[in-house]
Image (tube, rainbow, N blue to C red):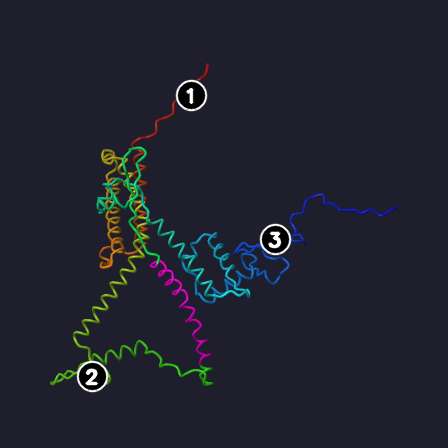
Amino acid sequence: MAEQDTMLVPKEPCDTLCEPDGDFEVKCVKCQYPIDAEDVSARKVGKQGPTCKSCHNVQTMLTKQLDHMPMEWDIMKPAEHVKFFQQCAQLKDEHGTLKYKHVRATLAQTLLTKEVSKVRRGALGEFHPLQHWINLGHSKEDVEEKAEKMVHPTVGTVTYRVDVFSISMEKIREEVEETLLSCSRDVKRKHAPAEAKAAAKKRAKGALPPPPPLPLTDEQVQEKQFLQSMVIDSDSDCEMIVPGKRPKSDKAAEKAAERAAARDVEKAHREISKLVPRALAVIRPMESRVARLVDSTGQDKLDLLPQCTSNLITEKRELLKKWLKACCDVTATFQSTDQKASWEMVPFADLKEVSTEMKACADAAKAVAEAKKALNPPKPKPAPKNKS
């Protein structure tokens, strides 16, 4: 008898599936580009899955050069991370080499795009009647000339939307550069001992000049300042002069104080220019929500609500109007060249205080909505008629 080929078929399906030995597509978890399965050296398997050579090199560069990734990177969407690694994969030169300066520029552009989109979302408000913007401090002529117009579909009146915030691309780019510099400074300090040892070896061979003198410690600086300001109490009322140092005159001291005050004003202006736009992005929608709720309820129904609830929502509305007007006044200083924002103009200290107050406003609005339902209970549904 001729031999017959037989094939064993299990009665039950297997619990596990085996990968085929043939060609199958493996994608990089970072850039989503396929990896050549035959090139084993190109597959760097990490905690999340296989990674291609390009993304592995990019991640290694960022780990070595940055002590930690910027906070904006952590809140980005996965699709934006994939786009970043795809852009880095296209930065190789003709020799297939990827340089850190190109990766850093791509990271800066990614953060810049993210920051610009966030600023634009926070800048645009809602459509309101002209009197609403006049009450917030805007002039009638500016609103009618510069604001976007729309006819209300129900009432039929003209409403306006005012862009109360504008910021230059240069300013956002400077903030992104400051963020990247703050992330990379810790790395320089971390590698300072190794770099110092390498420089000492080169200096011993005569390849480098001698190092500059070490900076003074805090104690040495305090002692030096004490000696410069020390005065001898004697009959002649002599003043001890440190050799090589001339005492500052009153005019020089006044100029130094003026420069220090100017630096403080500039620093406060920069901090406020970062704080107010982010706060404005959450204050404006909450103010509109509370205003709509109070207007739709009416003063007659507010008087029927519990006194604590009515007083609370009225207080929160006044607070939101005050904060919104203050933010609008502060943002006006950003466009002025001769006026700087100060902390006296800002009614809150940080974003944590704003977040806490917005949560309290949301709770007050929820309490009003529940109290309105209690005043107007739903009508019971009529019982179904029995069919004869």
Q: Give the farthest residue toward the left.
A: 235
Disc on the earlier residue, 2 or 3: 3
Bounds of the magenta span? 170-199
Instruction: Name the side, left or right, on which 56 lies relative to 308.
Output: right
Please state which of residues 240 and 273 is positioned toward the viewer in this rendering: 273
Number of numbered discs overlaid on the protein picture: 3
Residue at the spot of label 2: 241
Q: Which residue is mark 1?
A: 384
Q: Residues within 10 Å of mark 3 (few under 14, many from 20)?
A: few
Mark 1 → mark 2, Cα distance in angstroms: 104 Å
Q: How many neighbours does mark 1 have within 10 angstroms: few (below 14), some (14-19), or many (20 or more)? A: few
**In terms of secondary structure, what is the magenta stretch mainly?**
helix
Q: Nearer the viewer, mark 1 or mark 3?
A: 3
- Percent of width and height locating residue 199: 45, 79
Q: Which residue is mark 3?
A: 25
Circle 2 Cα neighbour tier, 10 Å, few/some/many (<14 / 14–19 / ≥20): some
Residue 30, image x, y percentages? 52, 56
